[in-house]
């Protein structure tokens, strides 16, 4: 039996995903009709990007699941017209991309590479960084991305503390949770990596109070969500030297406006939301597997908890 799969995203996404998704569905043994337009009452699955204009799911009367192309689902979790399972994107390409970006920037700040790169003025400055074992790293958020980044950094010798809202246990990491755990996680964080989802509970998790808990001169790295940081508080902490540097990949408004203070601040590095992109080939495999599971009456993978928002 053929299933009808609606691809609901921007036109350029369709050009990128059409062939890989068709191939992945074939390899998964799913007979599918994949299109960008269907009568709503005939659609079985929706492959969805939050950039899609689709907001009302009421007409999709036989819909079985919505499968997000993005890891972030904050723009759809509260949609009251969506009554079917919602799966977020978890795929190896996205995870490995995040691990590589985070590891690169942690190592950059750990080794003091900025000073070496910009200090080519004929002056012999010998500054020896500590070993990784003496540079505590804290990761806020221990989902798929946080876990993978933490495991990689721990394998390089960094003492890694991870914090999450609920208890987690990950070999090689000190896992803390809850309000008291957050305080302890921040207290030791010479390098702080933010990988929390965007929910009401995580908005401005890094604010004047929590920034003050960090060791003086700490580095903040945010490839998670722009809403995790109180921008004014971070700028004040940078100006005061409480935070030594901030490398930021995500922002409340994207692209980051040209007049935003982050662009000109000497202790801020802006990267244009490149920490981890969904790769069409690996993401298509994840989508196809969930459709195969739906057709086989098996549990979907990576379902979103609507109450938690991720």
Image (cartoon, rainbow, N blue to C red):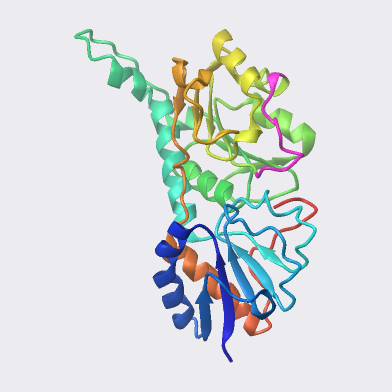
| Picture residue at 75% right of the left edge, 63% below the top | 82
Residue name at image x 23 percent, y 7 percent: 123
Residue at 65%, 34% (x, y): give it. Answer: 227
Residue 213: which quarter of the image?
top right
Q: Is residue 50 left or right of residue 114?
A: right
Within the magenta stretch, is there residue 201? yes
Numbered marks: total: 0
Residue 110, by quadrant, is top left
Magenta residues (range): 197-208
In the rendered image of this protein, does residue 306 appear above or below residue 163? below
Residue 269 on image: x %, y %: 44, 25
Percent coordinates x, y for residue 167 in the rendering: 74, 48
The chief SS type of the magenta part is: loop
Q: Is residue 91 magenta-colored?
A: no
- Rendered location of residue 225, percent (x, y): 60, 39
Query: Horizontal and vertical percent for residue 239?
Result: 55, 10
The answer to which of 37 and 200 lies nearer the viewer is 37
Question: Which one is in front, 56 or 195?
Answer: 56
Farthest residue to the left: give it: 122
Quadrant of the snapshot with the N terminus: bottom right
Is there any visible trace of residue 190 in the rendered image?
A: yes
């Amino acid at each position: 039996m053929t299933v009808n799969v609606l691809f609901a995203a921007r036109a350029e996404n369709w050009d990128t995903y059409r062939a890989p998704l068709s191939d992945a569905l074939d390899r998964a043994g799913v007979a599918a009709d994949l299109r960008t337009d269907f009568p709503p009452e005939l659609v079985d699955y929706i492959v969805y990007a939050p950039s899609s204009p689709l907001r009302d799911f009421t007409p999709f009367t036989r819909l079985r699941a919505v499968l997000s192309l993005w890891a972030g689902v904050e723009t759809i979790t509260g949609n009251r017209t969506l009554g079917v399972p919602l799966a977020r994107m978890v795929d190896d390409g996205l995870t490995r991309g995040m691990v590589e970006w985070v590891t690169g920037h942690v190592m950059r700040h750990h080794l003091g590479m900025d000073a070496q790169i910009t200090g080519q003025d004929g002056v012999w400055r010998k500054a020896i960084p500590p070993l990784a074992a003496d540079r505590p790293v804290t990761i806020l958020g221990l989902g798929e991305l946080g876990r993978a980044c933490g495991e990689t950094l721990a394998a390089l010798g960094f003492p890694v503390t991870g914090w999450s809202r609920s208890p987690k246990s990950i070999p090689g990491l000190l896992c803390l949770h809850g309000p008291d755990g957050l305080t302890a996680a921040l207290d030791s964080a010479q390098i702080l990596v933010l990988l929390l989802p965007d929910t009401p509970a995580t908005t401005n998790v890094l604010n004047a109070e929590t920034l003050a808990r960090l060791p003086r001169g700490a580095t903040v790295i945010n490839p998670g969500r722009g809403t995790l940081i109180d921008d004014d508080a971070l700028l004040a902490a940078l100006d005061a030297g409480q935070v030594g540097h901030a490398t930021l990949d995500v922002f409340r408004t994207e692209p980051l406006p040209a007049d935003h203070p982050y662009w000109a601040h000497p202790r801020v590095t802006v990267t244009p939301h490149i920490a981890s992109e969904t790769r069409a080939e690996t993401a298509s495999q994840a989508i196809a597997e969930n459709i195969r599971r739906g057709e086989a009456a098996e549990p979907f993978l990576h379902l979103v908890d609507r109450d938690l928002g991720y």
